[in-house]
Every structure is written in structure tokens, then in C-alpha cells.
Image: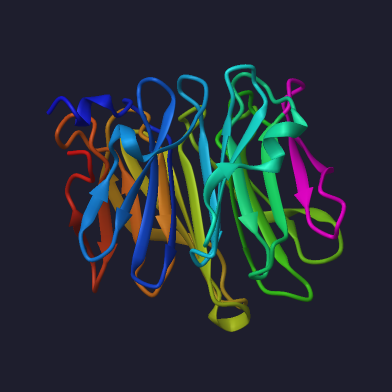
Amino acid sequence: MAAINDILIRTALAAVRKDSHLRVYQTAVDGGIREVQYEGKWMGGEPRNVIATGKIGTPVAATSIGFQHIRVYYVTPDNHLGEAAYDSGTGWYDGNLSSKKFAVAPYSSVAAIFLGGQTILRVYGQLPDNTIQEWVYGGGSGWTVGSNLGAALPGTQIAATTWGKDPFHLRVYAQDANLNVFEKTWDGQGWHTGGLRFANKIPRAALGVTSWGEGGSLGIRLYYGAPGNVIKEKAWDGTSGGWYDGGFQEACIPASNVAALPLDVLRVYLQNGTEDTAVTEYMWSNGWRVGHAALPPA
């Protein structure tokens, strides 16, 4: 029990996968970002699995191209963006974004995506003026400041997903000052306000998103913290439909964060109180079920 109690109540959560191989990132009480691995069995999550250290309570975002390239983003003790980078054959190292000293609000969340299976990156955080800012990597210019997506609730969670190529399709989700969860969209011709917008009485509600396919086979799943200490789901299937309430509704600890991985096996990670601070995995298989009750170090 001592080892699992190293994991923070309301730990940050992020996840990536390559086929059935999984990586989940969670935070310890000292700001350490720990990697948990699934390679036929769950392992990791120990102090020796720390890949970076952020501020106490740092948010965490992760994105990958398979496991050839993994990038994990967080907020440093002096409120700048930090990057932990993994490249196959090299291992973990401090990424170039860390040296740029891009300042964010002390309460900023963070989201990140690789575009089109290429080493093109977008990272999103909140500035001290409460707007959502994009930072861009790719095209030979290194890291540069991208678009500003406008004002949001101070301390809002931020979630992002992407699909396609030529053009890329990007979606960013956050919460506004009236507590509405909203969507920003990029489909090759600038940023626009998307079709998803719904009221949520929980301020700074947890947000996590995943997607798969494109066009008529597109699936998007947005997971969010809802009243009553539950994580719920909004769903989009195909271009001809619209957003609807999904079937995921699972109890969580107050203000649990949430992360998700896409099909072929849809997975959701949250804290529900199992073994105090352990992260629980849910899997979709003709219905939602617990995939693993308590991730390591439990």
C-alpha cells in the first residue's frame, strides 16, 4: 500500500499505445511523472520509472507515433512547458520544447498531438490571460508559437485529438467561463468553433478525448467529469451523425482526471478509489467492464 500512496490524489493521466502494447503516465506526490507499461502484463509505476519531474500537481499530456516516438508534456515548477521525449534506439531525454521556456498560467492544463503519423506536433496550454495557446513543431523551424484559440475558463482542462492527412483534422476541447464544454476545429482552413457545446455544472471538469478512423468511419469519444462524481461520455460516429450521449458512466473520486485510448480496444483510465489512489482501467468489449482494477504500483 505504501507504493501506491506515492500516486497523487487526482493524478494527471495520459496514455498512448502501439497495437496491444500500452503506456500510461501518472503523477506522484513529488511531481514525478511515472510510466506504467503493459507488455502482456502491467508493470512499472515505481520511482525508477520516472521520466520527468514537473511542478506538484502538474498536468500531463502524451502523444506518440507507435512507440518509435513518444512525447510527454507537463508544466515545470517555474510554470513553463516541459517535454520528455522518447525515441527508439535513444531512450528518454529532455525534449527541445523544455529549452524554449514557453510560459503558461500556473493553473494551465496541457494537451498534445502528433499529426498524420509524422513528426509534426501541436501542444496546447493556457496563458496567463486565460486564452488557449497552440505551439507548433515541424517544417524545419523548430518550436514556434502557433494559433491562439481564444478565452476559456481559468484552469480549464484541455484535450486534443487528430486524424487524417492532407488536410489534417484537429479537435481541441475546453470549458468556457460559463462552464460550457466547447470544441474548436481545424480542417485545413483555420480554426473554427465546432459543433459540440454542452453545459456542465462542474468547473474545471476532467476532459479526455480519443478518436479513430476518418470520414464515414470516424469515431470520437470525449470523456468528462460530471456532477455526482462520475465520468461520462460524448460520442460522434461518422460524418452524417451528430454528437450524442455515450454509454460510459463510471463512478470516480471527486475531480478524478481521465484519459482514453482508441479502438481496436477502447480503454478509459480514471481513479475510482480502488486501493486509495490507484488508476483503474475500463475496456469496451460488448459493454464496459473493468480491464484492470489497479494499475501499478498497486
Q: Is residue 166 above or below residue 223?
A: below
Q: How many marks?
A: 0
Question: In front: 146, or 21?
Answer: 21
Give the magenta range. Answer: 127-151
Q: For the stretch drawn in magenta, what is the main secondary structure?
A: strand
Q: Is residue 2 left or right of residue 219?
A: left
State the image coordinates of residue 23 (x, y, percent, origin top left).
Answer: 38, 54
Q: Is residue 85 left or right of residue 298?
A: right
Q: Residue at x 64, y 42 (%)?
A: 95
Furthest residue toward bottom: 216
Residue 228 visible, this angle: no
Q: Residue at x 79, y 54 (%)?
A: 192
Q: Is residue 130 above or below residue 295?
A: above
State the image coordinates of residue 257 (x, y, percent, origin top left).
Answer: 40, 37
State the image coordinates of residue 259 (x, y, percent, origin top left).
Answer: 42, 48
Q: Is residue 245 above or below residue 254?
A: below
